[in-house]
Image (tube, rainbow, N blue to C red):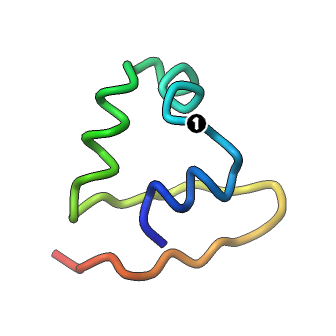
Amino acid sequence: MPLNRLRNARNLTQEHLAGILRKDQSAISQMERRSDMYVHTNFPEGSIRITGLTPQ
């Protein structure tokens, strides 16, 4: 799952996520455009499978 779809699935805007991560919105936008972005975290509802990322 691309980072922007994951963010949307969590009902977060780029601005809201930026506030949580203490970044500005443009930094979130840049992260979402990267092809080598990896997400590693736990969600209270359980696991989320992230697909479509290319390995290094």
Farthest left residue?
56
Q: Which residue is mark 1?
A: 13
Q: Position of residue 35 (x, y in %)?
A: 22, 64
Amino acid found under the numbered disc labelled 1: Thr
Q: Is residue 2 left or right of residue 32?
A: right
Q: Position of residue 46 (x, y in %)?
A: 78, 68
Looking at the image, is 39 positioned above or below residue 25? below
What's the residue at 54%, 19% (across, down)?
A: 19
Q: Considering the numbered disc 1 on the image, is that residue within a helix, a strand or a loop?
A: loop
Q: Position of residue 49 (x, y in %)?
A: 58, 78
Q: Is residue 44 left or right of residue 15?
A: right
User: Foreground residue, 54 or 32?
Assistant: 32
Q: Position of residue 41 (x, y in %)?
A: 57, 54
Q: Quadrant of residue 2?
A: bottom left
What's the residue at 34%, 50% (across, down)?
A: 32
What's the residue at 61%, 53% (across, down)?
A: 8
Q: Quadrant of residue 51?
A: bottom left
Q: Is residue 53 left or right of residue 34?
A: right
